[in-house]
Image (cartoon, helix red, strand yellow):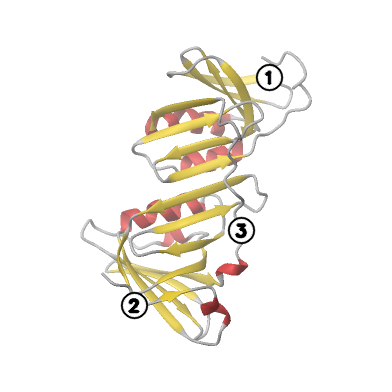
């Protein structure tokens, strides 16, 4: 298929009215919107010939999401658009396996909008000039790589990380023992309220603390299939990756007890 046009950032600043359409696979589009809306209210969405891509940072710049799905069946344009995703995932119309979502981005003839329609309903949200959307920082990767990396089936990773994060009062500690990934709910005084060891191909090593609230939101929006790779280390961000979906979360310090024997 040959694309007929490319809409760049100037398309939002001039006075020209236009619409762009893309036919999407509903399940793939949901797998973009759901993880993004768990972290941010708005994002820059890139519509390409075959894929939808989003990379966004939360307002406090604690966590970043990067996700891409090959879910574009056909489109008459490539473009970047700022899109209000807060609540969009819940409003998307239902679908059957044979359905297609039609995403229409309209600009310059009134309110800018992004509309998702299928035979079973319609959802509309605000669209923006992509230049006004908060830029995501460079992906926070340690210079020498992460201290530890563990890959688990997605249901198991979601269970241990999400279960501890939901139970934690404020923080989650992730560490490695010989042959185990250890995830613990830890309060501000270093008291372990809950712990969950999971068998894993990993050697004993360093630990790090992360915000339970952010971790709970991210894990709850992760894809339920495939494998999740968990990367972490002392004074390193936490990275969670499932195929082309990646989250990263800054570490959290507990100065009250970090200098003592909190283990």
List x then y, in percent, for residue 241: 45, 39
Dividing the picture into quadrants, the one containing residue 114 is bottom left
Q: CA distance from mark 2 to mark 1?
A: 61 Å
Question: What SS does tag 1 mark?
Answer: loop
Q: Crowdedness of circle 1 by 10 Å Cα count: few (<14), some, many (20+)?
A: few
Task: Give the side of residue 61 with respect to residue 162, left or right.
Answer: right
Q: Quadrant of the C terminus?
A: top right
Residue labelled with disc 1: 191
Q: CA distance from mark 3 to mark 2?
A: 28 Å
Q: Residue at x 63, y 19 (%)?
A: 192
Q: Crowdedness of circle 2 by 10 Å Cα count: few (<14), some, many (20+)?
A: few
Report if residue 88 is visible in the image.
Answer: yes
Q: Residue at x 28, y 59 (%)?
A: 95
Mark closest to the chain's N terminus, 1 or 3: 3
Residue labelled with disc 3: 135
Residue labelled with disc 2: 4
Mark closest to the chain's N terminus, 2 or 1: 2
Report if residue 169 is visible in the image.
Answer: no
Task: Give the side of residue 135 with respect to residue 5, left or right.
Answer: right
Q: CA distance from mark 1 to mark 3?
A: 37 Å
Question: What SS does tag 2 mark?
Answer: loop
């Amino acid at each position: 298929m040959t694309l007929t046009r490319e809409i760049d950032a100037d398309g939002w600043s001039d006075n020209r009215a236009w619409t762009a359409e893309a036919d999407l696979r509903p399940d793939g589009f949901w797998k973009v919107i759901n993880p993004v809306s768990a972290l941010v209210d708005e994002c820059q969405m890139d519509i390409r010939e075959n894929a939808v891509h989003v990379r966004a940072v939360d307002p406090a710049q604690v966590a970043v999401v990067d996700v891409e799905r090959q879910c574009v069946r056909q489109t008459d344009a490539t473009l970047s658009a700022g899109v209000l995703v807060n609540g969009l995932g819940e409003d998307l119309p239902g679908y059957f396996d044979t359905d297609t979502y039609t995403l229409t981005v309209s600009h310059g003839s009134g309110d800018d909008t992004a509309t998702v329609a299928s035979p079973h309903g319609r959802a509309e949200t605000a669209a923006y000039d992509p230049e006004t959307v908060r830029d995501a920082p460079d992906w926070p990767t340690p210079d020498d790589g992460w201290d530890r990396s563990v890959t688990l089936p997605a249901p198991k990773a979601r269970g241990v990380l999400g279960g501890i994060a939901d139970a934690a009062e404020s923080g989650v500690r992730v560490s490695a023992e010989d042959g185990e990934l250890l995830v613990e709910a830890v309060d501000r005084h270093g008291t372990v309220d809950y712990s969950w060891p999971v068998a894993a191909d990993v050697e004993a090593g360093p630990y790090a603390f992360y915000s339970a609230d952010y971790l709970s939101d991210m894990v709850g929006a992760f894809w339920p299939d495939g494998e999740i790779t968990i990367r972490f280390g002392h004074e390193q961000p936490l990275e969670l990756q499932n195929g082309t979906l990646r989250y990263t979360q800054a570490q959290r310090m507990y100065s009250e007890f970090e200098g003592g024997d909190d283990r």
